Image: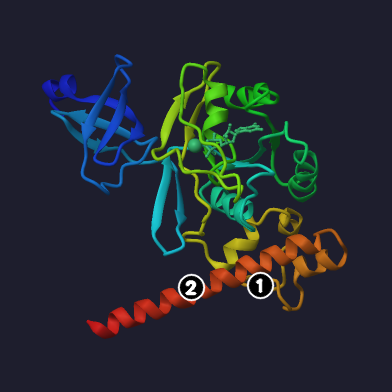
């Protein structure tokens, strides 16, 4: 890089993705600028970039969060993250397995997962929170909040104060944007009422945006999604990262490629029989394992077909 290049090349971070353009917050002057990019250019919020003569170059990522949609499409949800906040509520409830897939994905990507039960002001929330606690309390940090009353927000601020960058993921309508509005009074993200008959969220957040918290740390608001399909996770990785199976990593199974079904010397099934892993955890694991196997079979089938056509 010449001296001239150094002067005209600006460094920054993508703070919003607008489809055919991105908004960049520049390091040097803390100003924002809109830079055009190709649709599906692969840039995501959180990406570090350089900009020279309106040309944007993405710098290598230290981490990224990926998910599959129901049609097998791969999406990178955010980049250069430290933690994933899985936001849930008693209304609307997350789809079965959503929290587990998000936790496994976070752990695979080397990110710290936390679960945040929002809408704690609703009467039905207490029982839901108890269920979440009994399932996940030994696996990861759990927070309860109400974006409406402000309860629990200080705990979230304290958590991020260490300078972490996190992302809110969760179904539409659980209150991700409302939480961010309450955490950062200077922003006003659009929020949407639930559809009364279906008790589902309306899709009001359409772009991911990154926000700095006053006390330190950063949070990304993302559009809600219900399908958190696992990406690049093998059937043997699953148990290793599965919430509730932590105890089993202390002593390995007899076989390295054990899938914890009926293999002899399996540590997981042993802990289930000793009631040190709950039946519920084991059943959920078995369901996700089954899905992963079906996905692997389909991928192999597609690859074979592709080779045959060549
Ligand atoms: N009772 C209650 N309602 C909330 C809370 N947080 C959000 N909501 C409501 O839930 C609906 C969806 O909120 P929104 O922030 O758009 O959810 P998002 O889709 O996850 O971003 C809106 O009607 C909010 O007012 C909360 O803590 N308590
Ligand atoms: Mg939203």
Extreme-top residue of the structure = 29
Identified at 61% across, 65% down, the residue is: 288
- Quick one: quadrant of the C terminus? bottom left
Residue 296 numbered mark, or none: 2
107 w.r.t. 262: above or below: above
Tally the numbered discs: 2
Q: Quadrant of residue 27?
A: top left
Q: Quadrant of residue 255?
A: bottom right
216 w.r.t. 302: above or below: above
Extreme-front residue of the structure = 197
Q: Position of residue 208 (x, y in %)?
A: 41, 37
User: Looking at this view, is 55 or 176 the one in front?
Assistant: 176
* Circle 2 crowding by C-alpha within 10 Å: few under 14, some 14–19, many from 20: some
Identified at 48% across, 73% down, the residue is: 296
Secondary structure category for the residue under label 1: loop
User: Looking at this view, is 98 or 142 the one in front?
Assistant: 98
| Visual colour scheme | rainbow
Drawn side of residue 115 relative to residue 247, left or right: left
Q: Position of residue 93 (x, y in %)?
A: 65, 49
Q: Position of residue 68 (x, y in %)?
A: 45, 58
- Quick one: quadrant of the N terminus? top left
């Amino acid at each position: 890089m010449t001296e001239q290049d150094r002067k005209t090349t600006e460094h920054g971070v993508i703070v919003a993705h607008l489809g055919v353009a991105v908004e960049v917050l520049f390091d040097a002057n803390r100003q924002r600028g809109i830079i055009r990019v190709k649709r599906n250019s692969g840039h995501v919020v959180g990406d570090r970039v350089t900009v020279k003569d309106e040309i944007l170059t993405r710098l290598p990522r230290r981490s990224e969060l990926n998910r599959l949609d129901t049609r097998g499409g791969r999406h990178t949800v955010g980049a250069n993250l430290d933690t994933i906040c899985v936001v849930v509520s008693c209304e609307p409830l997350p789809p079965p397995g959503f929290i587990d897939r998000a936790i496994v994905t976070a752990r695979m990507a080397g990110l710290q997962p936390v679960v945040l039960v929002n809408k704690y002001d609703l009467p039905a929330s207490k029982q839901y929170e108890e269920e979440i606690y009994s399932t996940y309390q030994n696996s990861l940090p759990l927070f309860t909040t109400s974006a409406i009353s402000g309860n629990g927000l200080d705990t979230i601020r304290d958590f991020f104060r260490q300078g972490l960058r996190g992302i809110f993921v969760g179904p539409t309508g659980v209150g991700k944007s409302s939480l961010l509005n309450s955490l950062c009074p200077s922003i006003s993200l659009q929020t949407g009422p639930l559809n009364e008959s279906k008790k589902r969220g309306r899709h009001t957040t359409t772009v991911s945006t990154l926000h700095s918290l006053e006390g330190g740390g950063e949070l990304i608001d993302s559009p809600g999604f219900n399908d958190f399909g696992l990406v690049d996770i093998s059937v043997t990785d699953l148990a290793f990262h599965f919430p509730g199976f932590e105890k089993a990593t202390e002593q390995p199974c007899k076989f390295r490629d054990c899938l914890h079904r009926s293999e002899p010397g399996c540590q997981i099934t042993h802990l289930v029989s000793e009631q040190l892993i709950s039946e519920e955890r084991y059943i959920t694991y078995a369901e996700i394992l089954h899905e992963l196997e079906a996905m692997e079979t389909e991928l192999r089938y597609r690859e074979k077909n592709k080779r045959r056509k060549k």
